[in-house]
Every structure is written in structure tokens, then in C-alpha cells.
Image (cartoon, helix red, strand yellow):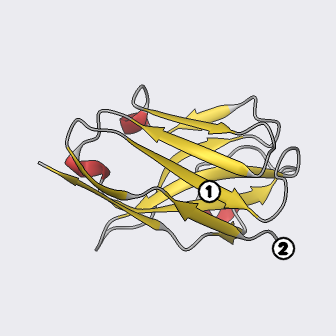
Amino acid sequence: QVQLVESGGGLVQAGGSLRLSCVASESTVNTYNMAWFRQDSGNEREFVAAIRGSGVETTYADDVKGRFTILRDNGGNTMILEMYSLKQSDTGVYYCAAGSFLKPLSASAPSYDYWGQGTQVTVSS
């Protein structure tokens, strides 16, 4: 099974930017759909963005569209989430997830089988 490790979280002021990385233990190209979810204390885990195994199709949560970009590196082991114009509401633990490439791209957490440990993003005022 694939193992996922996130990095890049930190403390940033509102309006700032961060770049999160998720490194997989194997290539995910044409093998796994990949996604980012986030969870703030007391809230349910929520979808942020996802990218198809082919890297061609992407989908975003409405409140991050135009501010976040999800992409893969050319080698296929790393997924990136570029976050701009950060808001306090973006605060949370960001999780990387992988699910079967054979399934449609999904914003639903149960569609993903493998999860990383998360990286904390804190946006201050």
C-alpha cells in the first residue's frame, strides 16, 4: 500500500501563501487519484482539492477556487498544493489522500483509501 507524507505547513498571516507537498512511497501517476482534505478542531474533515491519476482533471472546493492550485510533479511521486490569499478560515490540519485511479474523481473522503498524518496550517489575522 502507498504511504503518504505531507510537509510545508506553518504559520502565515492572512493574505499570505504556503506550498504543501505530499510525497508518496511510489509513483501515483495513472495509479491513484490524489486529494487534499483539511480539518479544523471541532469540525469534520472537508474536501479541498483533488487531481486525477492522469494529472489532467482537477476539482476544487468552492471556497478555494482561484486561490489554491493542485498539481503533480513530473516524476509522479509528489503532489503539491499551492495556496494563495490565505484566510483565517483556511486554518486546519491538511491531509493528503490517495484513492484508486479506477474510481471517478471525488470530493468524498470514503473514496480515498490511504491517508497521510497531516500538516498544520495556521493563518493568523
Residue 122 in picture, x, y percent from top left: 27, 58
Mark 1 is surrounded, within 10 Å at the Cα level, by few (under 14), some (14 to 19) or many (20 or more) other residues, namely many
Question: Residue pushed farthest top?
Answer: 66
State the residue in front, 112 or 27.
27
What is the spatial separation of the Cα atoms under label 2 and label 1, in whole angstroms? 15 Å
Q: Residue at x 50, y 50 (%)?
A: 20
Mark 2 is surrounded, within 10 Å at the Cα level, by few (under 14), some (14 to 19) or many (20 or more) other residues, namely few
State the residue in front, 114 or 6.
6
Left or right: 117 with respect to 115? left
Q: Name the residue carrying label 1.
A: 22
Q: Which mark is residue 12?
A: none
Q: Residue at x 59, y 35 (%)?
A: 59
Query: Which circle, 2 or 1, is nearer the viewer?
Result: 1
Residue 106 in picture, x, y percent from top left: 66, 48
The answer to which quarter of the image holds residue 85 is top left
Q: Residue at x 62, y 67 (%)?
A: 5
Secondary structure at badge 2 equals loop
Q: Residue at x 41, y 58 (%)?
A: 9
Q: Name the residue carrying label 2.
A: 1
Figure label count:
2
Residue 36 in picture, x, y percent from top left: 55, 53
State the residue in front, 100 or 22.
22
